[in-house]
Image (cartoon, grey):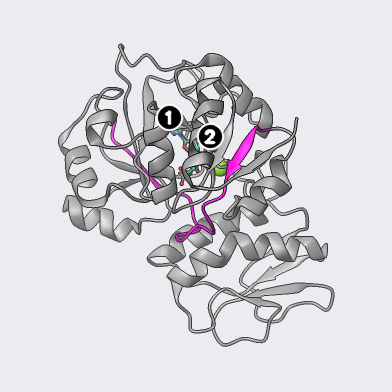
Amino acid sequence: MDTETLGPDEDGLSRAAEILTGGGLVAFPTETVYGLGGDAKNDHAVARIFAAKNRPTFNPLIVHVADVDTAKRYVSWNDAAEILTTAFWPGPLTLVLPIRDDSGLSELVTSGLPSLAVRVPAHPAFRSLLKAFGGPLAGPSANPSGRISPTSADHVIAGLAGKIDAVLDGGPCEVGLESTIIGLTDTPVLLRPGGLPVEAAEAALGYPLGRHNDGDPLVAPGQMTSHYAPGAPVRLNVTEPRENEVLLGFGHVTCDLNLSESGDLTEAAANLFGYLHRLDETGAPIAVSPIPDHGLGRAINDRLRRAAAPRP
Ligand code: TXA
Ligand code: MG
C-alpha cells in the first residue's frame, strides 16, 4: 500500500476523515508525539493498528477525544478526573478510568481490561481531524512497537510507510514526549511520567500520586523495561564518551548533538526522540550526558532508561 502524506488543510482533512471512516489508518500529529489513528469503534481498524506496529495485543491503546463531555461517554468520572482535566485538558495528560459498559468501543482497544485510557490533545491539526472524522480515535504512538517514538511526519514515514494509509503532517511535535499517564481506577497513581510534569499534577490534586514500580504487575505495558529503543546500544550518565560512541549531550558539553545547551528541560524533551532518530542513523553506539531528574527530566530519564535497557 502507498502511504499518502496529507496537509492539515480542508482537502487533507476530508481525505483523512474518509480513510478513517472506511476503517483505514491515519497517523496524526499531537503536541506530544504522532499517533497512529484508527476508528476506536471498529474492530477491524483497531486490529490493523496492532498489526502495523507489530504491537503485542495485550498492550491497550489510548482513545483520543475532543473534550471532557465526549470522554464521559466512554469512562466513569470521578473527582480527581474533574480536577486534573479542568487544569490540564486539552494537553499532554492521559487518564485511565473505569470503562463504561455502554462505551461501544472495540474490545481490542482495552485488550480486555476493565479500564480505558482517554486523552484530549491540544494540537490544532489533530482537533480539526477529530472534528472532520467525528468519532473516538484509538491511537498508540506511530512507531514500530518498542522503537523510538515519532515527533515528525518523516519519522512516521521512516517507520511505517507501506503499512498505514496516510500521515497528516502537522509539523514537529512541540512537547516531544508522550503524555503523562495517571491511573484513576483506585488511589491515583502515576503510570507513566510524560509531557506534563508530575509536580504539576500533584500540585493540582493537592496530594502526591502513588508510584508504579518496575517490579509491580504490568499495568501499562509502555512500562516494559526495553522500549523506545534505537538500533544501536545506549549508555547513560556519560561524561567521558568512548572513541566509537556518539554523544547526545545536555548543557555545556562537547558532543555530537546537544538536547539543550542552556540546560532547558523543555527544550531537551522536544529534541529527545528526533535526536535519537538522527544518532541512530549513524549506526554508532550512543552515549548520553546526565540529565537532571526533576520536572520533564523525569520523563526524559524514564525514556532513556528504557532505550538503554537490555533488549528482549
Ligand atoms: O502522548 C501520548 O500518549 C501518545 C499520543 C499519540 O497520544 N500516545 C501514546 O500511546 O504514547 P502508546 O500506546 O505508545 O502508549 C500508551 C500507554 C501504553 O503504555 C499502554 O500500555 C498504556 O498507555 N495504557 C493504555 N490503556 C491502558 C489501560 N487501560 N490501563 C493502563 N495502561 C494503559
Ligand atoms: Mg508508544
In the image, taking residue 188 as reference, residue 260 lies left or right, namely: right
- Crowdedness near tag 2: few (<14), some (14–19) or many (≥20) residues, C-alpha within 10 Å: many
The amino acid type, in three-letter code, at marker 2 is Ala
Q: Nearer the viewer, residue 6 or 283?
A: 6
Image coords of residue 47 (percent x, y): 60, 20
Q: Is residue 207 visible?
A: no
Q: Main secondary structure of the magenta part?
A: loop
Q: Nearer the viewer, residue 15 or 222?
A: 15
Image coords of residue 64 (percent x, y): 40, 35
The vertical placement of 102 against 210, above or below, is above
Q: Quadrant of the N terminus?
A: top right
The residue shown at (45%, 45%) is 213
Q: Which mark is residue 206?
A: none
The amino acid type, in three-letter code, at marker 1 is Phe
User: Which residue bears the numbered disc 2?
Assistant: 16
* Residue 177 included in the magenta stretch of the image: yes
* Residue 234 included in the magenta stretch of the image: no
Which comes before the other along the chain, label 1 or label 2?
Answer: 2
The residue shown at (61%, 51%) is 153
Image coords of residue 192 (percent x, y): 43, 46
* Residues shaded magenta: 164-185
Q: Residue furthest front?
A: 11
Mark 1–mark 2 CB contact (< 8 Å) = yes
In the image, taking residue 269 as reference, residue 134 lies left or right, namely: left
Q: Is residue 1 visible?
A: yes
Image coords of residue 38 (percent x, y): 52, 28
